[in-house]
Image (cartoon, rainbow, N blue to C red):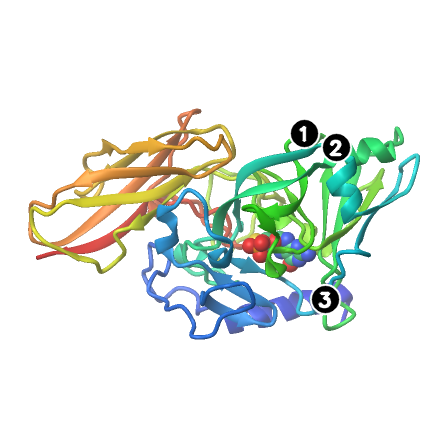
Amino acid sequence: MQRRDFLKASIAASAAIIGTSASAGVTTQPIDNREVSKIAFPEKKPLITYSDRPPLLESPRSVFTQAITPNDEFFVRWHLPEIPTHIDPNTYTIKIDGLVNQELNITLNDLKNNFEQVEVVAVLQCGGNSRSAFNPTPGGVQWGSGAMGCAKWKGVRLSDLLNQAGLKKEAHWIGFNGQDTAAYYETPNFVRELEIEELDDHVIVAYEMNGEDLPYLNGYPLRLVIPGYYSDSWVKMLSHITVTDKYKSLFFMDIAYRVPNNETESETPEEKFPTTKPITVMNVKSVIGYPLNGTTVYLNSHVVIRGVAFDDGHGIKDVLISVDDGQTWEKAELDNKAGRYAFKTFRFAYKPSTYGKINIMAKAVNRLGKEQPFAKDVLWNHGGYKYNGIDVVQIHVI
Ligand SMILES: Nc1nc2c(c(=O)[nH]1)N[C@H]1C(S)=C(S)[C@@H](COP(=O)(O)O)O[C@H]1N2
Ligand SMILES: [Mo]
């Protein structure tokens, strides 16, 4: 078997284990009734657990009433099973090489003392977040809506590091490599490549998350933070940055985390569009954190609907709430002092006036006027990426 084939075959096999069967169900919302596991990983509360090796942990929906997602409830996604279990902060270095004037080996101490320290509050969201809402179900981890979170990241600008090394004029691509490795040698390391033009001053190499060292599972001691981008390129346990002139064909960049180039039509399970592109910037999205699906409330009681909304950094303009299946919408109150890449929290005072099952919907609109589509209008794609349908929870009024 060709190497490529082996990879495809192993991906398909793992998808079959993690994924549910295609078609059948009529899910139009992310699966929402999974329980958190009984066991907890280091530095984490018990979370929804899909796999322990590599760790795949989802945050419960209820955390999305908060502007900042606590570190111990923050989701976790690794692709490769071998993650170093011992990291020595005194000797850890990040190497910068390739098309640079001066190769650098920067220690954590250097990073913290010899560069300007910057902070950004930014949403980290897996491109496959909410994948379980697609119908038919694409293979891959069947995330509900909790493969995302928002944190305050602290570190140094990537551009400051690259300037220190000095880019040669042919420099065009930057590769980022983490410390995790595959269990089988055929699978390459987790490496991402970005074009230099994509990397502005907002991109940081972070060592702190919400005022603490990065949790081990979120990439201790260093990770890339690319505000506004899906998190597949936020490489964790970052230890090597290589500058090149040409794009090197890489597994994760070439197969995973890509969507059809054509973003106006859906793919179908039978047909794949011929050309794809990386998923890059996030689309507009909101998630309701309260009430939860199945919550029982009294007629005429005061229910405060709460949640979070975000986009790629253009900024959320409105979050609209509907309690009549999308016929009429009203504006929620918004709050956010943390900047355009952060969660905007929303709240809406609701007094249920009819008995029975009520669907509460939230739809975010950004400053460009882009808004979340109804679930049925979200573009289906083979990878199950970029789901951003109007969020819905169903409550029971008694
Ligand atoms: N080294 C390394 N970095 C990685 C990955 C990985 O498998 N290895 N997965 C990426 C993907 S796809 C996601 S969604 C995020 C998850 O970040 P988190 O575990 O901190 O939530 O890490 C990204 N960075
Ligand atoms: Mo991801």
The image quarter in which residue 25 lies: bottom left
Q: Residue at 70% of width from left, 55% of height from top?
A: 237
Q: Regarding mark 1 in the picture, which secondary structure is present there?
A: loop
Q: Which residue is mark 1?
A: 201
Vertical order, 204 against 179 (above or below):
above
Mark 1 near mark 3, Cβ–Cβ under 8 Å? no
- The C terminus lies in quadrant: bottom left
| Rendered location of residue 118, percent (x, y) | 64, 34
Disc 1/disc 3 C-alpha distance (Å)? 30 Å
Q: Which residue is mark 3?
A: 84
Q: Which residue is mark 2?
A: 159
Q: Regarding mark 3 in the picture, which secondary structure is present there?
A: loop
Q: Specify few, some or many for label 3: CA neighbours under 10 Å numbering under 14, 14-19, or 20 or more.
A: few
| Rendered location of residue 378, percent (x, y) | 40, 45
Which mark sits nearer the N-terminus, 1 or 3? 3
Which mark sits nearer the N-terminus, 3 or 2? 3
Disc 2/disc 1 C-alpha distance (Å)? 6 Å
Q: Give 4 or 127, whichever is nearer the viewer.
A: 127
Horizontal side, residue 254 vs residue 348: left or right: right
The amino acid marked with disc number 2 is Ser
Disc 3/disc 2 C-alpha distance (Å)? 27 Å
Residue 56 is at least partly visible in this image: yes
Which quarter of the rendered image does ligand 1 occupy? bottom right
Q: Specify few, some or many for label 1: CA neighbours under 10 Å numbering under 14, 14-19, or 20 or more.
A: few
Mark 2 near mark 1, Cβ–Cβ under 8 Å? yes
